Image: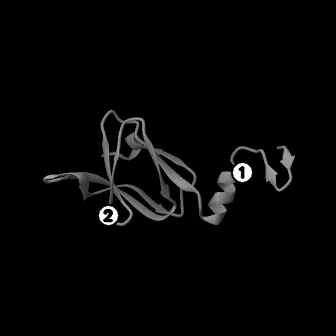
Amino acid sequence: MENIGPLTKEKGVKTQLDKKAGQAKITLVNDLSIDLLLRHGQGVSTRLKPGEKKQFDCSGDRVRKGKPRANNTIQFDDTDVILIESDGKGCGETVKASSVYK
């Protein structure tokens, strides 16, 4: 570890500090061959294309699998499938869609 004043150059130190401060994010990576429809936050709809990734807050953010809404290509409806339920655990981690997608 190289000391450069109050900062250090050790991999993972920032993540550990962010975890303690509650600022670390959970990263969801779409490693599937299809678009992943997501519902999260206060009714936000997100389409995650193959190879794309998105970060979510670690403090109580719930990410659900979405389903297409009739006559609407931008917004999705919730399903009962929860992909990520962050309750302060898993902060700073990366989750592959293939491991949680049903």
User: Residue 26: which numbered mark, if any?
Assistant: none
Q: Looking at numbered disc 1 in the image, what kind of residue is underneath it?
A: Val
Q: Is residue 68 left or right of residue 61?
A: left
The residue at the point 54 percent across, 55 percent down is 25
Q: Which residue is mark 1?
A: 13
State the image coordinates of residue 18 (x, y, percent, origin top left): 64, 58
Image location of residue 24, percent across then percent down: 58, 57
Work out whether mark 2 precedes mark 1 in sequence or the reverse, and give the earlier one. 1
The part of the image, by quadrant, that contains residue 69 is bottom left
Image side of residue 75 versus residue 23, left or right: left
In the picture as drawn, the residue positioned furthest to the left comes out as 71
- Identify the coloring: one colour
The residue at 83%/56% (across/down) is: 6
Q: How many marks?
A: 2
Q: Residue furthest top?
A: 33
Report the mark closest to the observer, 2 or 1: 2
Residue at left offset 65%, top offset 52% = 15
Between the residue at mark 2 and the residue at mark 1, the CA separation in whole angstroms equals 33 Å
Question: How far from the left and from the top, in percent, is residue 32?
Answer: 36, 36
User: Residue at coordinates 86% horizontally, 53% vertically from top-left?
Assistant: 5
Give the residue type at disc 2.
Answer: Gly
- Residue 17 placement, left or right of 58: right
31 vs 35, nearest the viewer: 35
Q: Quadrant of the N terminus?
A: top right
Secondary structure of the residue carrying numbered label 1: helix
Residue 8 appears left or right of 47: right
Dot 1, crowdedness within 10 Å: few (<14), some or many (≥20)?
A: few
- Dot 2: what SS? loop
Residue 43 is labelled as 2
